[in-house]
Every structure is written in C-alpha cells, then in structure tokens.
Amino acid sequence: MKTTTSQFEKLMLTIADGWNEGNARKSADCFSEDAIYVEPPEKQLYHGRTELFEFFGGDKGTDLPMKMIWHHLAFNEEGQIGFGEYTFQMHGRYHGIVVIKVENGLVKYWREYQYPTELAWEEFTRHGTF
C-alpha cells in the first residue's frame, strides 16, 4: 500500500497533535510495531511502538507539556520517504529536521537531527527562510 503526500501530511499532523494534546497513544499509533526512532549518533534510540508509547509519556503523561510545530513537510511517493522541519518544545526549544520512511501507512524509520536554541524559528532560519 503506497502512502500519498496528503496521507503523509495527515500522519505527521497526527503525531504532532498527539504530542500537543499529551496523548501518547495517538502519536505512538502512527508508528509501526517494529519502528525505529533515532537521533544519531544514538542520542535517542527507541525500538517499536511500545517503547515509543512510553517515550511519548505513556499512560501517565510527561512531566512538562510537549509542543510540536511543523514548518515544512515534503514526501516522495515513489520512495515512501519524507522529511519535515519542525520546532519542538519541552525541556527547552529545539529546531530540527526529521527524515521518515513510511511502510503500509505508518512510520517505519524516524531519524531526527535537532539543535537546541531559544531563538524563534524565524530568527533561527532568517538567512534561509522559504
């Protein structure tokens, strides 16, 4: 089953909505049972939906609220690979990019690179805003 660009965008928005709502299940259910979530070089490494559910707050939630905003999303339907630029806040503010491999409509691989900063997105990207 091939995922379309609009389905990919909806999947990414559902992940962000789950984090923003404190709903770990909503976000975790967007990942395959055997998904890999990594921030190289293994700064963060999680295997599977069950580990991700706990990482996203599990049943008890997180100690601080999460805030996720997508700035840009793109998807290659043929290769089933997408990326997104984002801002994430919880224990500080991070701007980053994630590369995502989708299989059967779910995230199979999530590889993120992020930079901690207190700058707003517009200041952070002022020389390269699209």
Image (cartoon, grey):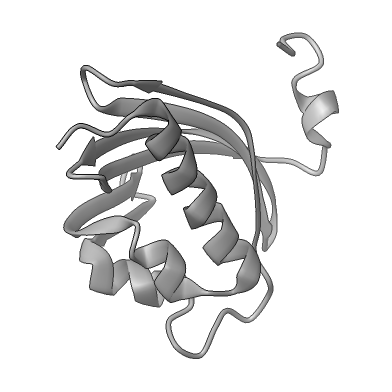
Q: Quadrant of residue 75?
A: top left
Is 35 placed left or right of 68 in the picture? left
* Above or below: residue 128 compared with residue 5: above
Tell whether 45 sits left or right of 74.
left
Quarter of the image with the N terminus is top left
Q: Is residue 2 left or right of residue 23?
A: left
Q: Nearer the viewer, residue 104 or 49?
A: 104
Count of numbered marks: 0
Residue located 43% across and 28% down the image: 83
Q: Out of 82 and 1, give the one closest to the viewer.
A: 1
**Res 81 quadrant in image:** top left
Q: Quadrant of the C terminus?
A: top right
Identity of the residue drawn at 39% across and 38% down: 7
Q: Position of residue 52 (x, y in %)?
A: 34, 67
- Which residue does the image show at 41% across and 74% down from the upper left? 25
Residue 29 in the image: state x and y as whole percent.
33, 65
Residue 129 placement: quadrant? top right
Q: Name the spot of residue 48 as percent of width and height, x first.
A: 21, 63
- The residue drawn where x is 47% and y is 44% is 10
User: At which x and y percent is residue 67?
Assistant: 68, 58
Position of residue 124 relative to residue 23, above or below, is: above
